């Protein structure tokens, strides 16, 4: 262990995420002055098996304050980390997990462990004078992953629990990042003008996409297809449409309440099939309730050649749940969120298992995100297939697209 890598200070503070809610920022500082800092994001649409946040639940900040987490870091956890090497990420994360000893970080809090684990990783990167996008890189040839950019938000991201959650576009085949961003700009602004013309522009959702007022999933996809065509591109050939259904958010005791219309899983399957067959949807995330592995598998089997089925709440960046999804042949890809499992080490284990089984990996931000850009850096270093951080508005989203621009310059 290099003396320069020994952790000397662990600092914590309350900061605020993109929704204006309190969250935790931590800093790891070594004896040599190497430094890493990270803010923990927060989800609105959360899977029942992901790491839980610890919040104070008192009168301050409407019960969402994080003073208890900060005190935990300052009074108990910091002393366990000081004197350790920041370069041993597995050992660092093991300390956090050994302290917690629950499957969902119920004692330490996923918001505490996430900020600490990422800060340590960035500290080690700084110590080694290696950019985070090239630190412990998983591929000899670094590349920009395919971006998945939101055009409309819905569901938990728009205060409307009874609609699909995300409508996004992504490049189908080989792509120029600059050209893709130009296409996104054109489609995003075409959509805005169309909404304004129809008196249907009601602002933006949590992740920067348009608010889907008075529009159902078919209306939204039709507008996006129009925007693609107006950009002289071909839907499902140049650009694909991706939908995050987030079905668990409008599921209740065997039925789905979609736009206040109660339907069963057969009805929902028919809606999804129509979107695939008639509206060029080629990626579908969380199409059914998060414990319904059979329906995931059936939809995947029915549309093997035309759509990829992605698991988010189904898997929750959890190694054992991903193994179950692989055994049941119910996903083509998974969403990867660091704060779902709570540490870098666990995240990398999930990515490795996915790659080993030819499961696509999509590194994702959360709806309550931050100005940090580490996701862009990790997406390149960890050789994920895609990155999903929101829309083409709001600075906590564009900061990550901008960071990919900077990284691409350095990769040329």
Image (cartoon, grey):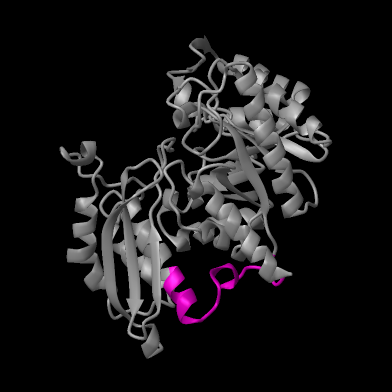
Location of the N terminus by quadrant is bottom left
- Place of residue 184 in the rendered image (x, y in percent of width and height, measured from the top left): 69, 41
Question: Which of 319 and 43 lies nearest the eye of the viewer?
Answer: 43
- Place of residue 337 in the rendered image (x, y in percent of width and height, measured from the top left): 49, 50
Location of the C terminus by quadrant is bottom right
Question: Which residue appears farthest toward the top when viewing the image?
Answer: 261
Question: Which of 184 and 383 lies nearest the eye of the viewer?
Answer: 184
Instruction: Using the image, determine if residue 13 lies above or below residue 126.
Output: above
- Place of residue 124 in the rendered image (x, y in percent of width and height, measured from the top left): 45, 76
Instruction: Using the image, determine if residue 397 lies above or below residue 6.
Output: above
Residue found at x 67% / y 55% = 145
Q: Is residue 125 magenta?
A: yes
Residue found at x 60% / y 17% = 216
- Place of residue 40 in the rendered image (x, y in percent of width and height, measured from the top left): 38, 53
Residue 66 makes an appearance in the image: yes
Residue found at x 53% / y 47% = 397
Q: Which residues are magenta?
A: 121-142
Q: Is residue 132 left or right of residue 90?
A: right
Q: Quadrant of residue 77?
A: bottom left
């Amino acid at each position: 262990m290099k003396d320069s890598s020994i952790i000397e200070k662990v600092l914590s503070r309350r900061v605020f995420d993109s929704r204006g809610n309190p969250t935790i920022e931590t800093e790891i500082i070594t004896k040599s002055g190497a430094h890493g800092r990270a803010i923990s994001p927060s989800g609105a649409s959360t899977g029942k098996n992901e790491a839980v946040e610890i919040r104070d639940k008192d009168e301050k900040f409407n019960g969402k304050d994080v003073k208890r987490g900060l005190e935990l870091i300052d009074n108990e956890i910091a002393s366990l980390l000081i004197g350790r090497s920041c370069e041993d990420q597995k050992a660092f994360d093991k300390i956090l997990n050994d302290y917690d000893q629950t499957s969902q970080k119920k004692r330490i809090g996923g918001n505490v462990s996430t900020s600490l684990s990422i800060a340590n990783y960035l500290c080690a990167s700084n110590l080694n004078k290696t950019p985070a996008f090239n630190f412990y890189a998983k591929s000899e040839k670094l590349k920009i992953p395919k971006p998945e950019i939101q055009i409309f938000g819905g569901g938990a991201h728009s205060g409307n629990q009874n609609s699909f959650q995300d409508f996004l576009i992504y490049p189908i085949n080989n792509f120029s990042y600059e050209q893709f961003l130009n296409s996104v700009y054109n489609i995003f602004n075409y959509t805005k003008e169309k909404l304004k013309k129809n008196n249907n522009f009601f602002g933006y959702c949590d992740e920067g996409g348009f608010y889907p007022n008075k529009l159902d999933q078919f209306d939204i996809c039709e507008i996006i297809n129009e925007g693609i065509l107006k950009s002289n591109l071909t839907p499902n050939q140049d650009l694909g449409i991706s939908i995050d259904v987030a079905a668990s958010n409008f599921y209740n005791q065997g039925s789905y309440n979609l736009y206040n219309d109660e339907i069963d899983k057969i009805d929902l399957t028919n809606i999804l099939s129509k979107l695939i067959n008639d509206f060029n949807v080629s990626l579908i995330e969380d199409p059914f309730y998060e414990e319904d592995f059979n329906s995931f598998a059936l939809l995947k089997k029915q549309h093997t050649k035309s759509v990829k089925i992605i698991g988010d709440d189904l898997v929750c960046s959890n190694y054992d749940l991903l193994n179950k999804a692989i055994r049941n042949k119910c996903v083509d890809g998974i969403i990867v969120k660091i704060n779902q499992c709570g540490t870098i080490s666990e995240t990398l284990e999930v990515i490795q298992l996915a790659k080993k089984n030819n499961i696509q990996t999509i590194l994702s931000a959360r709806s309550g995100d931050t100005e940090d850009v580490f996701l862009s850096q990790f997406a390149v270093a960890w050789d994920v297939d895609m990155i999903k951080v929101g829309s083409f508005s709001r600075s906590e989203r564009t900061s990550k697209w901008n960071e990919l621009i900077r990284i691409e310059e350095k990769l040329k």
